[in-house]
Image (cartoon, rainbow, N blue to C red):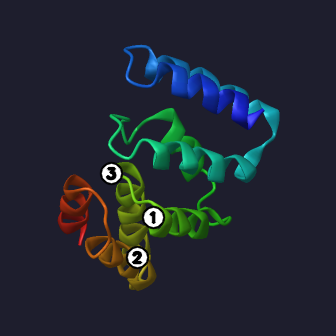
Amino acid sequence: MTEEIIERLEEYLGSEEFEYEAENCMEELDESGEGINAVLPLLRFLERHPMADISMTSAVVRYMQQFYGRGYENILMDSVRRRPTVHTVRMLGRLRNAAIDEGQDGEEFEDVLIDVLSSEAEDEIKDTVRELI
């Protein structure tokens, strides 16, 4: 199910209908019961399109963030280590800020972000990290 949905996202990426289709896809994914198992394939989708214009309020991002506190954090950190994207570093920045807001230091998230600066990531991604830390 998840792979079929990602194929539809790929088809609509870059079109004016992307957000509408993403809403429909994530609703179907939610109803399918895939749950957190869909997070890794969705992150891989983002990794294939590191500079894609996907809103941070996108249904895709919101779907993944619902698993905060249930393993999403580690899956996201692994994704950023593997292939950072504009969106995944922003998502990790949100986790860092949430940790700080909750009285934690957010260091583990910040360390992953800092590592992006010495990676082969695109300059725009590195600039995004600099804005976040």
Task: Report whether 19 appears left or right of 89.
Answer: right
User: Looking at the picture, which amino acid does disc 3 mark?
Assistant: Val
Q: How many marks?
A: 3
Residue at position x 58%, y 42% in the image: 63
Residue at position x 31%, y 66% in the image: 120
* Residue 53, horizontal then vertical, whole percent: 33, 34
Of residues 27 and 5, the one nearer the viewer is 5
Dot 2 corresponds to which residue? 112
Is the C-beta separation of discs 2 and 1 under 8 Å? yes
Q: Which residue lies most toward the top here?
A: 17
User: Looking at the picture, which amino acid does disc 2 mark?
Assistant: Val
Query: Are there few (<14), some (14-19), or many (20+) residues within 10 Å of tag 2?
Result: some
Marks 3/2: CA distance?
A: 14 Å
Per the image, label 2 sits on a secondary structure element best described as: helix
Of residues 61 and 99, the one nearer the viewer is 61
Residue at position x 23%, y 58% in the image: 128
Residue 58 placement: quadrant: top left
Residue at position x 74%, y 47% in the image: 35
- In the image, residue 46 sits, relative to residue 111, either above or below, namely above
For marks 2 and 1 on the same chain, the one whose residue lies earlier in the sequence = 1
Dot 1 corresponds to which residue? 80
User: Looking at the picture, which amino acid does disc 1 mark?
Assistant: Val
Per the image, label 3 sits on a secondary structure element best described as: helix
- In the image, residue 123 sits, relative to residue 58, either above or below, namely below
Is the C-beta separation of discs 1 and 3 under 8 Å? no
For marks 1 and 3 on the same chain, the one whose residue lies earlier in the sequence = 1
Dot 3 corresponds to which residue? 86
Marks 2/1: CA distance?
A: 7 Å
